[in-house]
Image (cartoon, rainbow, N blue to C red):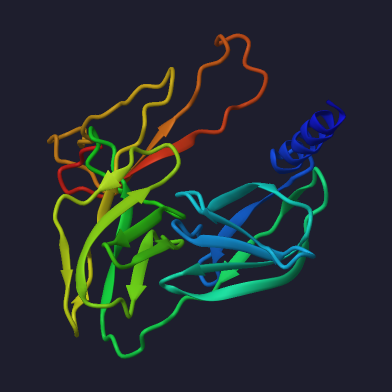
Amino acid sequence: MSSLRLFFSIFMVCILAFSGLYAGNLQGVVHDAESGTAIAAAQVFALTYTAEGDSLFYAGQTGEDGQYMMSDLAPYSYVVWCQHPDYLPLKVNDMVVSENASLSLDFTLDRVHHPDYDTRLSGTVYSAPEMLPAFIPLVGASVTIYNNNSRYQTQSNDEGRYTFHNIPPGDYKLTANAPHHQPYEHTDIISVMEGDYIDNLDIHLIPLPYPNTSTVFGTITGPADNTPVYPAYITVIPLYYTMTDIPEPVEPEIYAVINNPDGSY
């Protein structure tokens, strides 16, 4: 009976040791070194050897936000590395995971450039309200092109422009997203061949509706002959107070710039 109790005790200790009771977690974010954007589908590995020579191996993968997490790592010192087909791998030695520790380890990867590919894909990302004819360039929108072999991400600049350089020839899908806008997916497959410079592939993102907001549209015309007036500016002054209770002059806010020949806004 005593030997049975001893076996049962040892068995329970083994279960507790490998069930995560004393294990740690490792998490982080993987970024593109050039653009700073998150890298999806990057693989992160952790490897160590016990005193008995047994290997312990863990693996994780980043999501669309570039985040990964590996749970229940036994307390050891690990070699951790990150890899992606379009980037140079990066390795970190002697990553010590303590009991019950939650550690953070971010990776910034350098893209593998292909200078032999003379290709370019570019355009402008616009905020395009459905009821307005004016398009506003979007700053910091995330643009992604991908196929079964590769995935590339970039962000629109201060003028709303995005550019992909030296991408391998192939067929790509294109998606884009930005805060407060509906996600965008290009309807057609984009075929890139050697020597192609595909410019002005513009993206129009539709804003999400804000609560308690309205849209105003119309036409600006002259007082005499109803000739359309442009350029012009549309301003809105909020009437928060009654006419007899305005404490300070309220500065008008420019909501739209009219550059259309028909004077519409």
Q: Nearer the viewer, residue 23 or 217?
A: 23
Can the viewer see residue 138? yes
Q: Would residue 5 appear left or right of 83 to someone viewing this image?
A: right
Q: Which quarter of the rendered picture does the C terminus lie within?
A: top left
Instruction: Give the answer, above or below, for where 152 lies relative to 112.
Output: above
Left or right of 91? Residue 52 is: right
Question: Which residue is found at the position 75% from the left and 41% from the top?
Answer: 14
Residue 30 rendering spot, x and y as whole percentages: 56, 60
Residue furthest bottom as drawn: 116
- Where residue 124 appears, as percent x and y from the top left, is 31, 60
**Residue 59 placement: quadrant:** bottom right
State the image coordinates of residue 170 (x, y, percent, origin top left).
Answer: 20, 72
Q: Is residue 45 above or below residue 136?
A: below
Residue at 82% over, 47% down: 99
Instruction: Count the marks.
Output: 0
**Is residue 164 rendered to the left or right of residue 70?**
left
Q: Is residue 80 left or right of residue 237?
A: right
Is residue 136 in view from this perspective?
no
User: Residue at the spot x=69%, y=71% of the render?
Assistant: 92
Question: Image quadrant for the N terminus?
Answer: top right
x%, y% of residue 13?
Answer: 79, 38
Question: Which residue reaches farthest front?
Answer: 1
